[in-house]
Image (cartoon, rainbow, N blue to C red):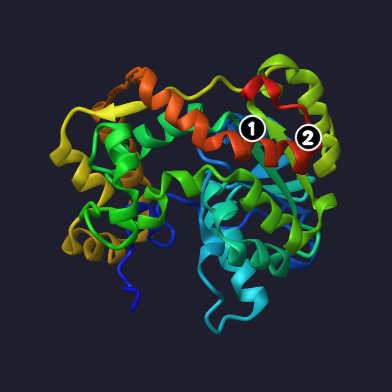
């Protein structure tokens, strides 16, 4: 049974977001078309999201990953459901915006969320950004460590624990979704994409590779804008890749990522005018507690094991996308 307890301060309704509507705010029947940057995690989705967010013709969700569609409507009418999302995650939305975006990379793993996106807006389009799965695994593992979803520092050891964790063993106490500890399954991009294609149709999906952002940024950006129907604002580069980070104090990280119940209840009872101030404090504390995290080099044995494991997946993905991925092998 799922608890009603929010998972973090950021999950609380209205936390850090404006709630008053602008005079130019469109009605629910006039919302611009929606698009979703659905993943995959640690593959360049943040660079794409940040670049599109910088385009004045786009309203992008704040924060980038709302995860709103992971939960069912639960008795709300479609209008109420949409209204809640727009008020909570798009405080800047106005009649000049040509598209409304969301960067929840969890959606690539959730066929239910993809189906809800079409219910939310029948015009919805979907953008996936992928990279070599072995490179992605290193960055993804570091990110799970930072979020306290993982507690095994060594990727090879965490990889070897997958079978036990699939049986519910050795799950970190603060892990929010043990499925993300199944590293091999997370990297099966072709399977996740095929599932999305089956639900929404291939023509609603744009798939980019990380190297597209690096080697042909302007061409890729124009392709993106054409896909979502947004005017060009002249950007020539994608936002710089976000560096991996770790934390200085585990105690403070635990408090920020998984606060006690009494803290959450206190925040929920606060006057809404005080909430943005609390959000700024939380962001400042996170920033002060962060420090750069170097990717520990993989042993040759681990690298070869991962390359062998993902070799069939790379072939399947190349066939699905009709792209030459021989440089990934």
Q: Nearer the viewer, residue 25 or 283?
A: 283
Q: Is residue 243 above or below residue 142?
A: above
For marks 2 and 1 on the same chain, the one whose residue lies earlier in the sequence: 1
Residue shown at the point (60%, 32%) measured from the top left: 50
Which residue is at 86% across, 36% downward? 226
* Residue at point 16%, 37% (across, down): 250
Foreground of the two, 163 or 251: 163
Nearer-the-camera pick, 246 or 86: 246
Mark 1 is surrounded, within 10 Å at the Cα level, by few (under 14), some (14 to 19) or many (20 or more) other residues, namely: many
Q: Which residue is mark 2?
A: 224
* Spot occupied by residue 1 in the image (x, y as percentages of width and height): 33, 79
Task: Report the side of 191 relative to 274 (left or right).
Answer: right
Q: Is residue 147 left or right of residue 116?
A: left
Asked if residue 175 shows in the view, the reply is yes
Numbered label attached to residue 291: none
Tell me the element at label 1. Answer: helix
Contact check, label 2 and label 1, Cβ < 8 Å? yes
Q: Secondary structure at mark 2?
A: helix
In this figure, which residue is indicated by the disc labeled 1?
Answer: 48
115 over 233 or under it: above or below: below
Where residue 110 sits in the image (x, y, percent)?
A: 56, 60
Q: Position of residue 86 (x, y in %)?
A: 61, 59
Camera sees residue 238: no
Residue 167 spot, x, y in % from top left: 30, 63
Residue 183 lies in quadrant: top left
**Residue at left offset 37%, top offset 49%:** 181
Residue extending furthest bottom? Answer: 75
């Amino acid at each position: 049974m799922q608890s009603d307890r929010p998972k973090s301060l950021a999950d609380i309704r209205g936390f850090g977001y404006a709630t008053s509507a602008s005079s130019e705010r469109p009605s629910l029947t006039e919302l611009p078309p929606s698009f979703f940057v659905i993943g995959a995690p640690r593959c360049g989705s943040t660079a794409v999201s940040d670049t599109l967010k910088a385009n004045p013709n786009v309203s992008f969700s704040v924060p980038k990953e709302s995860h709103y569609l992971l939960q069912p409507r639960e008795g709300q009418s479609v209008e109420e459901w949409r209204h809640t999302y727009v008020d909570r995650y798009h405080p800047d939305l106005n009649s000049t915006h040509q598209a409304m975006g969301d960067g929840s990379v969890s959606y690539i793993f959730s066929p239910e969320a993809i189906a809800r996106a079409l219910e939310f807006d029948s015009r919805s389009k979907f953008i996936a950004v992928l990279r070599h799965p072995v490179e992605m695994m290193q960055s993804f593992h570091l990110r799970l460590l930072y979020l306290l979803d993982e507690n095994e520092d060594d990727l090879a050891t965490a990889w070897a624990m997958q079978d036990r964790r699939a049986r519910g063993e050795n799950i970190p106490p603060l892990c929010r979704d043990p499925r993300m500890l199944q590293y091999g399954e997370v990297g099966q991009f072709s399977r996740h994409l095929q599932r999305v294609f089956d639900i929404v149709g291939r023509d609603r999906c744009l798939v980019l590779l990380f190297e597209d952002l690096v080697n042909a940024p302007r061409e890729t950006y124009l392709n993106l804008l054409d896909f979502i129907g947004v005017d060009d604002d002249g950007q020539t580069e994608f936002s710089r890749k976000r560096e991996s980070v770790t934390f200085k104090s585990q105690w403070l990280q635990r408090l920020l990522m998984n606060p006690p119940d009494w803290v959450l209840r206190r925040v929920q009872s606060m006057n809404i005018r005080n909430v943005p101030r609390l959000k700024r404090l939380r962001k400042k504390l996170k920033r002060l507690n962060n420090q750069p995290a170097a990717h520990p080099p993989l042993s040759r044995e681990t690298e070869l094991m991962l390359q062998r494991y993902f070799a069939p997946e790379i072939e399947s993905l190349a066939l699905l996308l009709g792209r030459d991925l021989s440089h990934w092998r």
